[in-house]
Image: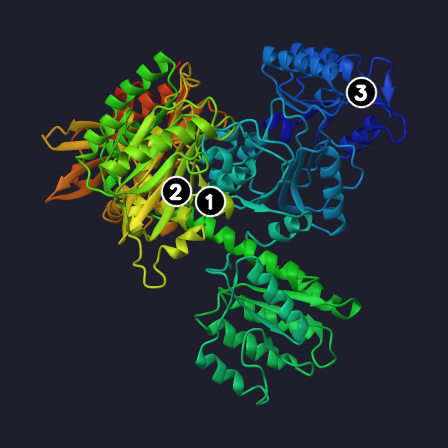
Amino acid sequence: MKQIFNPETIALIGATEKEHSVGRIILDNLLVSEQRKIFPVNPNRETILGHTCYPNVRDITVPVDLAVISVRAEIVPRCLEDCGLAGVEGVIIVSSGFSEVGPEGRKLEDEVIAIRNKYGMRVMGPNSIGIIRPTVGLNTTPIEDTPDKGNIAFITESGAFGRALLEWGISSHIGFSLIASLGAMIDVDFGDLIDFLGEDPYTRSIMIYMEHPVEDIKRFASAAKGFALNKPIIVLRPVPADEGEKTTRTLTGLLADHNRMYDALFKRIGVVRVKEVADIFNVASVLHTKRLPKGSRLLIITNAGGVGTMATNTLVELGGEPAVLSEESLRELDKFFPNYWNRQNPIYLLRDAEVERFSQSISIGLRDPGVDGILIVYTFQAAAKSEELARTVIELAQRSQKPIIISYMGGTGVMKGRKLLLEHNIPSYDTPEEAVKTYMYMYRYKRNLELLYETPSELAVDQAPPKNNLRVTVRRALKKGTTFFGGEEAARFLSNYGIPTIKSYTALTFEEAAHKAKGIEYPIVLKAVSPDIFDRADAGGLATGVKDEQQLRYEFERVSGRIKDKTLGARIAGITIQKMLEKIDYEVMLGAKRDSKFGSIIVFGMGGVGAQVFKDFSIALPPLNQTLARRLMEETQVYKLLHGYRGRPPADLQKMEEIIVAFSNLIVDFPEIAEMDVNPIAISDGKAYVLDARIIISDDMAESASQYPHLVITPYPTRYIMPWTLSDGTEVLLRPIRPEDEPLEHEMLSTLSDESLRTRFFQTIRNITHEMHVRFCNIDYDREMAIVAEVRERDRRRIIGIARLVIEPSLKSAEYAVVVHDNYHGKGLGYKLVDVLIGFAQDKGLEEVCGYVQSTNLKMLNVCKKLGFTSAPLPDHVSRVCLLLK
């Protein structure tokens, strides 16, 4: 990737002197960069613009880092082959005319892919407009205007739309660290760019225009989450019509579409999704600020009443909350207002308000604990000039941790104020609606970050459920061609994972039903079990309130007959008899679906048909912990009801979290589950009971080499859990770190000696923040590993050692680090931890593991020597130790 984004030598294949042509504009842009060597390639010319022109890239006598190809589509494969033979490592294909034009173009694209795979080159495009890096003076595009230097990276698929968006940004004087057009993405994709920008010191945020579905969701998610922990990513993704897979045998499959899945993915990895073009620049310019709102409670201050009302309406529509001022704040404001002022939010300052009244209102609002942020809506008035107000706002903003945003409404009368605010990085917007939308994006970004940084509570569902017998059941069913579990069989899956169900039995005849009903107290419910019917009530497959055996006979025959009449050809696997739960306070549902792009997803929502009729459901990607389970519920309307209303007792929400986490574990453990409904889950007197479930299985994942082929987010890797014994006989549990370990990890690091801290961090670092601790514990198991050594002391768990391995973006090498608590030095733990990391690196197919060790850390240098590491001295009394794995 370095060869593409910071090349020293560049060949332009298709260079020309023809005015206004793509090849000429690209050449002009390249030649501006004096520190790079540029080689025009065109077999029909000897010189171009006074520069030697080469007939073929293979004729260039120095190694070429980057080739830019701008020729007719049918010539591209031959040019790419020449690049491969010449040893070019990075290629940008500007040419169009590939898969986007039909079958013939698809054939050409397949040729290009085959050549790329043959030589291992990194290829951006085809149909890419190239890249611009103002910070390093690189422009490989046919765009004549050069943007200002800045800290925003802009990545786009579409050349045309991306170019229009870029030109809009340039006209608005927005500075960029990178502009990249990925085109067809046959090789270099969003994940590659995000990985590169994660190490780019010039980039503080990324804007992405995502036009088409992401091909490798797992790679994108892994790269984006790592970046979003430190810097914001903003995505503009249009919503295509009818996107998603609608062939389904469950309600969950009917509900879940790709647009909702993208929303769930972005929230999970800390990415902000915007809906409109104007939002992408507005949001990118503010999210890197440290002044993000802690909540959605916005105080609106204005010198024009109508626009304040408009801003409030927009805030409520977007799910925000108008801040309610405390009585103390209102009394303070009374001192500066006439006695007829409105005394509520929005604060109407009246048209004659001077800057002092603005200043006092803002100051009082910033002090009020019920205010999370302030919006000032200013219309040009002679009493308060825009530049005077701007100076006041700048001064107040610098002293506050709460965000202040401004809508300056007007033309030339507010230009001076806008300019001042821009110079001090305070956002200013033309309309109050724009300002409110940006504030809500700031709040959602903060909320997403909190999700990444929140330490989940320990739940009781960590114990491994008895699942091997269920695996046998699944394999036998698939072998027989059975793909459906319902009734009693589906309930067994849930019960094994600790999910409470109502006792039920499946019967094929009335006699069998009558016999089994003796073990269930009347009244009972009858439910038809069929792989072909997921809306049982509509099909007539439901009877409730059955009070005795006589009614049981009548309803059993009636349900069987209605199913046959209403659903011609439907297969009946039996009729479930179940104890009727007479008092139900609430109904919710859980579901799962395995999507071809997103893998398995989980749905929570209103029970019965409520999720479908009222669209009241939310989606999450497994695996889920307690925090994620709670957020999944919080995103629905039914969650508000679960707190209790109209005399109904509240649901046990912690138990609901446990049920969702247990359900997530079930989905993680069984890639064979294609679709699943758990609907309804009835809540009675606070307790939850599953009343019905159906499972659809398939063997689509049977040939995958991955342990979790159905998951975008890699789950906790239990395979690396192992007991071990220190040399003094102390029993230790070695296992991968978990987000829940943050308190234990904090305790260990805070009790290390200064010397141990120096050997790990190369300095005595005592002020490790909560966010840093959470980052250490909340890792992407695809990209890094942290193994902790855990002991039990007086019935307390303690971490006594941590070994960490971080894989480089190249996916070829990794850097390791180890720290052992002072009380456990010299007992073989450091050696064992490094050995476990080596095993993980081998499992990942890495070529090399390296680390940096202080020359005074003789114990670790000795460990490395025993394990076969080579050691090379570096400046500042540091040694680089490396172990080749291949």
Where residue 858 appears, x then y in whole percent? 26, 31
Callout 2: helix, strand or loop?
Answer: strand
Name the quarter where the N terminus is drawn: top right
Which of the 4 quarters of the picture holds residue 549?
top left
Which of the 4 quarters of the picture holds residue 348?
bottom right
Badge 3, how many Cα within 10 Å: few under 14, some, many 20+? many
Badge 1, how many Cα within 10 Å: few under 14, some, many 20+? many
Name the quarter where the C terminus is drawn: top left
Asked if residue 120 lies left or right of residue 503, the reply is right
Nearer the observer, 856 or 627: 627
Query: Do callouts 1 and 2 mark residues in contact (Cβ within 8 Å)?
Result: yes
Query: Do callouts 3 and 2 mark residues in contact (Cβ within 8 Å)?
Result: no
Q: Amino acid at mark 2?
A: Met
Q: How is the image coloured?
A: rainbow
Sooner in the amino-acid sequence: mark 1 or mark 2: 2
Q: Amino acid at mark 1?
A: Ala
Where residue 565 appears, x then y in whole percent? 46, 28
Which of the 4 quarters of the picture holds residue 8?
top right
Where residue 396 appears, x then y in whole percent? 55, 71
Q: Which residue is mark 2?
A: 589
Asked if residue 197 lies left or right of residue 732, the reply is right
- The answer for how far apart the CA atoms under marks 3 and 2 are is 59 Å
Callout 3: helix, strand or loop?
Answer: loop
- The answer for how far apart the CA atoms under marks 3 and 1 are is 57 Å
Q: Which residue is mark 3?
A: 14
Q: Which residue is mark 1?
A: 611
Badge 2, how many Cα within 10 Å: few under 14, some, many 20+? many
